[in-house]
Every structure is written in structure tokens, then in C-alpha cells.
Image (tube, helix red, strand yellow):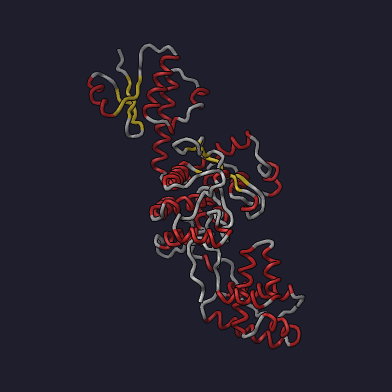
Amino acid sequence: MAKKTREGSPERGHGRVHELLANDPRVREWHAEKSLKSRLSADTYTRMLCLISERVGMTPEEIVTTAKKSPDKLRVRFAECASALKKDGWLDTSVAKGFLMVKAYLKYRHVSTDVFPPLSSTTGETIQNERVPTQEELGTVLDKLSLRGRVVALFMAHSGVRPQVVGSYQGESGLRLRDLPDLQLGGKTLSFSETPFVVRVPANLSKTRTAYTTFGTSQQATALLAYLSERRDSGEKLGPDSPVVAAQPTRGAARMRRENASFANGFLSTSVLMREIHRALTSSLPEGVTWRPYVLRSYCSTRLMMAEGAGKMTRDLREAILGHDTGVSGRYNVGKPWGPEVLKEARAQYKRAEPYLLTTVKAEEGNENATRVIRLLLEARGVSKEVLDKHDIGSMSDEEIVALIKTVGASTGTEKKTQKAVPVEEVPKLLEEGWEFIAPLNGKMAVLKAALP
């Protein structure tokens, strides 16, 4: 029986695998060698070797010996094993992958033999019913998650990071607050100096082992700031080395910190991080559709592709944001460390593509319309586009907008107001005085025009 584990424990897997590693020095050496590149791959290969060894009734050492002396006998055993696995519901693709891992062990033992059964593998069998969620469907999933789960989901769906970036396979590392250079930790209130905010993925967390830069949306920033504030209010001291997503401060987690050094840094393993997301996705499935947690990263890729098709973002930048190998063209454009100009342009492109990612599209579209009206109003009063570009009008409060209008009026020497923004409750009175209604502003304000003399 597999060991039960608490949140954050790196010890996962079948007990017989640990027994095999403890008792078979050659398998242990093979596992150690594969771990140099990837512990996840090493564990997966060893687990499959253990399973097939049990199914054919041979130890790994006996498989090696039989492959050398009686390959026909091993071929029959493997064929019987494949038939049994298929009866148990395994797809041909999964069975073939299992034998591929056994073949890797035989190769490690310098045994070259063709004893594996032919199988009719079909690419994509396990995900043939998986499609990318719509923005509304993703919003439904997010509503079912805790604050921490929402942060993890948004880092995958909006920043496009792989699950292992937030928390690695065994929980020994992950994204840290220092990897979010726009995050302001000082002061009573946490904030971002700019949105979209930068996310720098270190090379050790990147699948390609190359550091890259992506971004986070305003929706993502709101969730993250709320989550970090919750952690700080509970007594956690947040610093540059703090995990972006951390273990719950429970007694069980505290014991894990004492018992295992790799958990002392507060990171969670990938499997723990994905557990809640998997439940939320499963409970939100449309009829005839399947979703794995990785579909959130597919969501980011697909939505940015749509933004690319609409001319909001270049293909090279989309690939770079997803942490892909961008090829020769991308390597010259975005494949090197970004300077200030490239970062500014990349941030601008991501901001243009942001509405394609957000689950609150209608509200965002309303904000864009309101921003456009305000800009037109200020331009009509003689404000240059250069001045307007210095202000993030879409994120300004009503009071800040009114103050900006008054400031601009004074600086341009405008003596008589022809248009003004007022609270909606003042509209009826001003209409009676002869003012003309022009447009609404974010549901709280309205633009009115003075009556002609």
C-alpha cells in the first residue's frame, strides 16, 4: 500500500519502488544517474520498471539475464504482460511508454534486444476530449478555488508558466518573490509598481534550463496581493526569498520542516499544488470534455495566439513568454536578456493582449471605453497625447480623474468649462440647468456638456 502523505511531503510513490531501490544496487545506480538530469524522470522510469517486473514475475536482474540468454522467453512474457495491461484499461500508448522505460534500463545494462511487443500507439489518445476552456469557463473554475489555488491557476493561465515553476517536483524550490521585480514589499500595503507585472523565471525552474521573462495580468496581481496580505497578516515575514506560493502554516507542515530539509524553505511539491486545481477542474467539466491541470497553460497559449492573430502581439514574444525555444529568429529578437527598451515593448504588447486572458472581459471592455471617453474629453480641452500617455487613466480613481481634469483646466488657462465629469447623482440637477449628457464613466461618473449660449 502506498504511503499516505501530508501537504508538502516529497515522499510520494509506491512503497515497493522504495524497496526495489533499497535492495537492488544496479537499479539504484541507474536511478541516481537519471536523477542528475531530472528526479521526476528517474522516479517515473523506476516506477514503471518496478510495475512491469512484477507483472512478468521477474526481478530487474532476472529480466537482464533472460534478455541475454533466452530472449524468446522474455518476448512471450512481455506480450502476455501487454495483453494483461490492455485488459486492465491501459491504452496502447501507455503500454508502449512503459516498455520504453524498461528498454532504457536494458540499454543502461548494455543489453540490446528486440523483445518488446508491437503496439498500435495513437498520439493524443489520452487527451482527445480535452479542449481549452473559454474565458467564462475559466472564471467558473477560479470561483471554486481558495485564494492560494486561484494564484497558482492564474500563474499558469495568465503567465503561462508550467506547474513546476511555482513549486518543483519535490518541493525543494520554486518561484520566489524576488522573481517579481515590480512587487513592492515595503510599507503597510503591498503593491505592484506597474502592471502588467514582470515574472522572471530562473533557469533552474525552466524546462529548457534557460531563464526567461513573462508577465502577470491585473486580475492576477489582485489575487496575488490579497494572498500575500493574508500570509503577512497571519504572521509570516515576507522577503525576497519567500515563496510566491507557500505551505500552509499548520502543525503538520511545521513537523515536515523539522523532518525534511528540502521542505524547510516553505515550498510545496507540484503534486500538492495541482491537487486543488484538479478538483476544481473536475467539478466544472462541460459534458463530453476532460481537463487536466495542464490545460491552464494551454489556455494561455491559445488565448495569446488569438491576440497574435488580432495584431496585439508578435509570435516571437508569445513563444518567449511561454518559455519555448524560439528558434533562430526568436533567439536574435527575444532570446537574449532583455534591455529596458525590449522590456517596455514586451510589456506593452502583453497589455494589449491582456483582455484575451482575463475572465472579466466585459468589465475590461467597459473600462477601455471609459478610458477612451476621458482621453477624448481631455484632448478636447487642449491636453496633448504626450501628457495623456504619462497617466494610466484606466486605473485611476474617480477622485484622481476629477483632479486631473481640474489641473489640466488650470494649466491650459481654460476659463470656461464646456464639458465636465460629475457623480451620477448630480446629473438630474445639471440636466435641468441646461447641461447635455455625453457619456457614462465606469458606472459612477458621467460626462456632461455645457449648453450653448
Quadrant of res 219: top left
Q: Is residue 274 above or below residue 419?
A: below
Q: Report x, y in % for residue 414.
A: 40, 13
Q: Is residue 38 visible?
A: yes
Q: Report x, y in % for residue 236.
A: 47, 47
Q: Report x, y in % for residue 5.
A: 49, 67
Where's the C terminus, which quadrant? top left
Residue at 41% over, 14% down: 410
Q: Nearer the viewer, residue 106 or 359?
A: 106
Q: Nearer the viewer, residue 258 or 293?
A: 258
Quadrant of res 408: top left
Residue at 68% over, 66% down: 34
439 left or right, relative to 131: left
Q: Is residue 262 above or below residue 389?
A: below
Residue at 35% over, 17% down: 418
Q: Report x, y in % for residue 417.
A: 35, 16
Residue at 51% over, 26% down: 390
